[in-house]
Amino acid sequence: MKHIIFAIALLGAAPASAACYADYKAKQDNPLRLHYGVVKLTDDTCEKSAAGSAIAKRIGKDGWTLLTVISVFNDAALNGKKASAGAYFLRY
């Protein structure tokens, strides 16, 4: 019983996973419009290869087409991208 309680205590003490974000470029046609944005990703899309489809789905609802996922990063780099993303900072 002590071993079970100890294991449960260790699991509860484990650090939460860090937040995950990606920055991307997108476009709309007629007229051509471009934007740079930052999105928060879920744990299952926290890799550049998986982020693309998740981002494309979100921004596609507003008629945007994903051009590229630039990078995937954590909280430490988030504030440095806020000014560049402007209105598209965590919008999607």
Image (tube, rainbow, N blue to C red):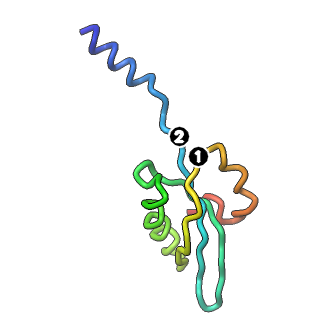
- In which quadrant is the C terminus drawn? bottom right
Place of residue 43 in the rendered image (x, y in percent of width and height, measured from the top left): 44, 48
Q: Quadrant of residue 83?
A: bottom right
Residue at the spot 65% in from the left edge and 68% down from the top edge: 36
Where is mark 1, residue-wise?
74
**Badge 1, how many Cα within 10 Å: few under 14, some, many 20+?**
some
Residue at the spot 43% in from the left edge and 67% down from the top edge: 53
Give the answer, above or below, for where 46 lies relative to 70: above
Give the answer, above or below, for where 5 lies relative to 54: above
Place of residue 81 in the rendered image (x, y in percent of width and height, measured from the top left): 70, 56
Residue at the spot 65% in from the left edge and 90% down from the top edge: 31
Q: Earlier in the sequence, mark 2 or mark 1?
A: 2
Q: Quadrant of residue 22?
A: bottom right
Where is mark 2, residue-wise?
18
Instruction: Specify the label residue 2 is tagged with.
Output: none
Q: Residue furthest right?
A: 83
Q: Amino acid at mark 2?
A: Ala
Q: Amino acid at mark 1?
A: Asn
Place of residue 8 in the rendered image (x, y in percent of width and height, measured from the top left): 34, 20
Give the answer, above or below, for where 56 lies relative to 38: below
- In which quadrant is the N terminus drawn? top left
Q: CA distance from mark 2 to mark 1?
A: 7 Å
Residue at the spot 55% in from the left edge and 77% down from the top edge: 64
Q: Name the side, left or right, on which 34 lies relative to 67.
A: right
Depth check: give the residue in front, 45 or 8.
45
Marks 2/1 in contact by CB < 8 Å: the verdict is yes
